[in-house]
Image: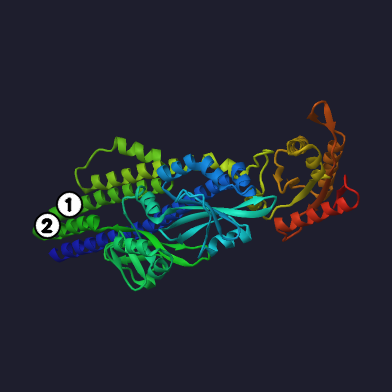
Amino acid sequence: MPFFIILIIGITCILFIRMESKFEEEEEYRFKRSSYSLISGTVQNCKEWLLSQALILARDKAVKESYIYDRPERIKNEFSDFWGLLHKDFGVEELHFFKYPDENFFSFSSLSAEPKILKNRKDVVFLQTAVIPSSYFFVCKRYPGLRASYPILVDQKVLGAISFGISIEKLANVLQSSVSEKVFYLLNKQVMKKNLDPEFFESWKKKSMKEDNLFYYYHLNETLPYQYLDEKTYKNGKNLFFIYPLEDYKGNIIGYIGVKRNYSFFFNYIYYITGLFLVTAIMVIVVVIVLSFSQTKYLKNQRDTILQLLTLVECRRFGEVENFYKTYIPTKDIFDSIIGKIATINKRLKSHIDEMYGKLKTTSKKAFIDELTGVFNRYALRNFHKILDGLNYSVLMVDIDHFKSVNDTFGHEVGDKVLKFLVNKIMDSIRIKDKVFRYGGEEFVILLPETSQDAAAKLAERIRKDVENSEINIGNFKKIKITASIGIAERRDGESIEEVIKRADEAMYRAKKAGRNRVSD
């Protein structure tokens, strides 16, 4: 009988340990998932916010006129207050205006209007030449961080680019405000030495807490084995690390940012309970059996509660976590601390997401809408085509005939009225699910989901006639008439949106060559 009881206790202990081991594995898995979601989400939010601000500046009328008339001092007069807001409230370290191909047109980092020739800024030259907005990690002369660059276009010609960014330390602080775990980062020593000015290199070197052959470590008093960096996770005892790569504009990794979680405080408690369970079992077998079941059930309830709360946080159901914490009755043990930590994480994450959503909401509309006509812009078209992937649709390419002569004869203000007039005629003719994009100066793309070429041709002819038969009041009791040439293309199997638009554009040019004011497919 005693042997049987001891066997039961032994089996119970083994099952208990296996249950806790499984719980530890689940915790590690959830930590990896939540860490990746948090870091990648924060980095992506920062990139999108930086790009949205760069887009606003790149399309600002004052900026374009400063480049056209070579007056950098106007940028200083127009945007000094805006720069102060970016620097003070959002931690932006620099705001540079570059003139194609490599001239420093104006820089708010020094508030100097004197142009300077740049060196070692191939990233900016690349972005201007390729006409591609981009956000990436970098190391400049003063600091490593996250930069956004956006080309400045006038009449589809690249005049320069806007570039500004935040320090890696600012990004780490944003992450740290959202989690209770330790946020750290490591930077490539060779890249730092090559790009930073000597005095700034020494300053960043002194701030590092550790170093090895390849990296300086910040906010982390230990080094990580190189073979685990590509795997993104590393476990050392009860310390679990998640590492996220920092890539420059060429895709090269210049460092990593990550979070460190220490499980010892929780599992030491479990080990203590297990040991107490074994000692008590030897002394009072019957009492131990009763206590073991009670304690196991108690810990299981704790585990289920923690997992449930973590799942709610992961699913961003913040209100349910807050309601649980309001009605929570303290158990006066370590479980109180764990619940408190989860509540704190929940509150900070909710606050961070609300803040980032508010910032993105105010800029997202400007990023995708053409300011003059109110329809989608070309940047929105590059994102919108993902929705139509695999579906049948047709495309209309609409171009105003002799639009340049309208601007030359009556001025750009009348030209703007003509553009708005055309958009109104198009919007009066299309369905709610059809989408209009300003593709160029006087060119517009109309996406027609679930529409055949024949149906698209009928719509195009209706728009053409409506435009031809209408007059535009341009003021001073004067009215003018315009015509439009329209190209049609229906998507073929396996064809991308770019290929469909190209065929519609070619059809539009055939309409132009055939005499204008007509529809062609």
Judge by depth and name the residue closer to the eye, 420 or 287: 420
Q: Amino acid at mark 2?
A: Thr
Q: Name the residue at the front extreme.
A: 114
Q: Residue at x 78, y 36 (%)?
A: 425
Horizontal side of residue 275 vs 205, given as left or right: left
Q: Is residue 374 above or below residue 64?
A: above
Residue pictured at 56% horizontal, 58% vertical = 103
- Circle 2 residues within 10 Å: few <14, some 14–19, many ≥20: some
Q: Is residue 320 above or below residue 141?
A: above
**Residue 358 in the figure: left or right of residue 463:** left
Q: Position of residue 443 (x, y in %)?
A: 75, 47
Ranked by sequence position, the earlier of labels 2 and 1 is: 2
Kindly identify the residue that appears in the image at 45 percent across and 60 percent down.
Answer: 140
Residue 6 is at least partly visible in this image: yes
Please tell me whether residue 394 is drawn above or below residue 264 in the rendered image. Answer: above
Badge 1 is on which residue? 291
Which residue in the rendered view is the most extreme toward the right?
Answer: 515
